Image: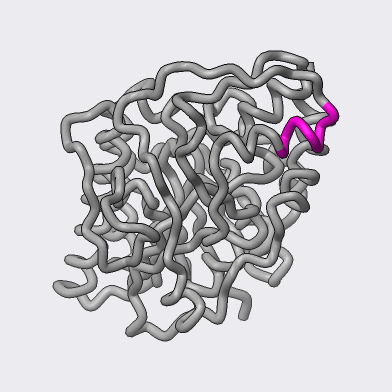
Amino acid sequence: MPKTVLVTGGAGFLGSHLCDRLLEQGCEVLCLDNFFTGRKRNVSRHLGNLDFELIRHDITAPFFLEKVDQIYNLACPASPVHYQWNPVHTTKSSVLGAINMLGLAKRIGASILQASTSEVYGDPEIHPQPESYKGAVNPIGIRACYDEGKRCAETLFFDYHREHKLTVKVVRIFNTYGPRMQPDDGRVVSNFILQALRGEEITIYGEGLQTRSFCYVDDLVDGLIRTMETADNFTGPVNLGNPAEFTIRELAEKVVELTGSKSPIVHRPLPADDPKQRCPDISLARQELSWEPATRLEEGLKKTIEYFRKNHDG
């Protein structure tokens, strides 16, 4: 029997790629999305597939199913532009969404994976960040709706595991990029690519010396599925990201080079609570999942640039 899999946030950037992969593996996929940041066009080619069902629903409200084997809980705006637009709803998406999906998983006996985030580490004081690091988050800052919402969701997952013996998995996702990123999401990769393609100034905040690690979406999806398929006693949390570290300045220069753009690079003040360094220690993922990213930054950027040229240039 094929597995039936529920993907919340399934029409979003990451969720739609996960739906693609699960369908390729022969799963029946239920894609749940409220379309705040998700887009129907991301999954439109599956609408005639009898193994795929698209459902409009906001996970801050309960959702009822009678049979599903696995749940991937990805639903929550993930870029500052979107999650700060309605910060109260962002927190509700993480906290109430976790409660509702955990309740569903408990009732029907499904395994459930939580897409957490490197943001739980805040502006880290140790580098790179292992899963044992407890983080340095500002609980009243403008990013806290996302950071603290995800931290609370992790708490709920582990309490359901301890109290109800629920099979849970928690992954902490670091910067991910690739086709289907939204042009208005405010993320650094999409910002730089669009500015370069349009010949606009490429905006760097601060000196551009802050570092990030960039994981291509195909590699990240592979890590999600490998985590879900681990033994029931492996809960995580496990970091999923690329340990190859680049400064924001280096990323901007690489995008200019690959697009052939004449865009100048300009500097603006650094936003509040913007982390100076963010890089995963993926020792646990290598050990437990036999996973590490396979896509080089230049290769992934070329694919992403090509997507934006076709869909969002101009």
Residue 78, compared with residue 117, is above or below; it is above
- Residue 88 appears in the picture as rendered: yes
Say whether residue 184 is left or right of residue 274: right
Compare residues 206 and 109 and report the one nearer the observer: 206
Q: Position of residue 259 (x, y in %)?
A: 81, 32
Magenta residues, start to end: 254-260
Residue at 46%, 59% (x, y): give it. Answer: 72
Chief secondary structure of the magenta portion: helix
Tell me the quarter of the picture where residue 109 sits: bottom left
Q: How many marks?
A: 0
Compare residues 9 and 48 and report the one nearer the observer: 9
Quarter of the image for the C terminus: give it: top right
Residue 128, compared with residue 84, is above or below; it is below
Query: Is 256 a magenta residue?
Result: yes
Say whether residue 137 is left or right of residue 181: left
Residue at 42%, 85% (x, y): give it. Answer: 231
Quarter of the image for the N terminus: give it: bottom right
Residue at 46%, 82% (x, y): give it. Answer: 288
